[in-house]
Image (cartoon, rainbow, N blue to C red):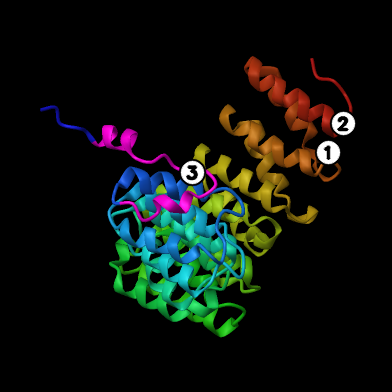
Amino acid sequence: METKTSSDALIDAEPLDPARPETWLTSDDPVRRLTAVGMHATPGAITVDNLDAFLACLDRCRDELDTLTVGAFILGALEPPLCCDATDQRMVGFLGRLDKSPLRLAAAHGLFRQKRLPNSAHLPLAQMLFHSEENIRQMAQLTFSLEPEAAAKTIAQTVAGMPREQWTPEALTTLVQSAGDSPIGRQQIGAFLRAELAKGANRLAVIASLAELARADSFVQPLLDLCSFCSNPALHADHPTALAALGGLGPVAKPAVPELINQLSQTTDPAKETLICKTLCKIGMDTEQLPLARVKDRIEHGPEIVIAPFCAMLALYPVAAKVVAPALKLRFVNASEPVRGVLAFSYRALTGEILS
């Protein structure tokens, strides 16, 4: 006697009525449930009348990742009054499924779309800030951005409960954001980060959180802390990250300009010079801060690799930088062909004349 497969059973079964997809929500067959859940993705398919049946179906699909993930995306697209305590309960449950990354991502995305952050979501979202996958961490951070202050206690406790070497940029940045507009709270977090850094905290995470502190506050200390990364030889590997963080702040980081110029005058490392020049260009300087003597010296005597970044600084301040034009002309004589192009471009920008 021939044994029927599950596919044969589906063929023999009553077909799904597209107008009534809920008829398969109560099926014992996982494939039918997935099909029925997917059919509810059509706008308006879920109503007050069938929402309970849809949620009951998801409750039955405990280990069916595809069905639950599709269901989470559908729930996340609902609007009031359909998104309610009952849908929040399922979404929070999905957030806590540690073995189901796509499901957690879909649930967090759904809550963010709905601008809903129930208290019960705080802990699983805080745990997601430490996930090994960056997109999971970023989605949790984005969801917390709805109301980070409301979750401040949970975020702080979760950070404190994790080994400091496992802290992530997303976790510490969210910790900073959870202080809201409280200057005292942000100062306390800054002091905490500096203390933990000395104890071996993840430096990349601390750099990101210091940048967030600097972005939100008028305090100079976080900027100086970032500068200290760049001046510490023992942290050489972190210099690019710290400088990129400062540059990313733009004009907010202007209080750090004197220290960066000081570091620029003291280093002869071409890689670091290049990074500092780029950072200063992104931050912007007052005209009187332009380190003309250093720029002139490095254009005349520095390795060719640093000429382009120093010339980039000159281009932002053409009037003040005219005094460097003779150095450009002098270096042009013995420069390689690619560098000659850079020097000629800068010289023309400063003087209007062509070098050849």
Residue 157 within the segment the image draws in magenta: no
Foreground residue among 146 and 324: 146
Q: Which residue is mark 3?
A: 17
Left or right of 79 on screen, residue 73: left
Q: Is residue 211 above or below residue 9?
A: below
Q: Which residue is mark 2?
A: 351
Quick one: SS at disc 2? helix
User: Residue 212 placed where, x, y %?
Assistant: 56, 65
Which residue in the rendered view is the most extreme toward the right? 352
- The region drawn magenta spans 6-27
- Placement of the N terminus among the 4 image quadrants: top left
Q: Is residue 226 visible?
A: no
Left or right of 299 on screen, residue 101: left
Q: Which three-letter amino acid code belongs to the residue tagged 1? A: Lys
Q: Nearer the viewer, mark 3 or mark 2?
A: 3
Q: Which residue is mark 1?
A: 322
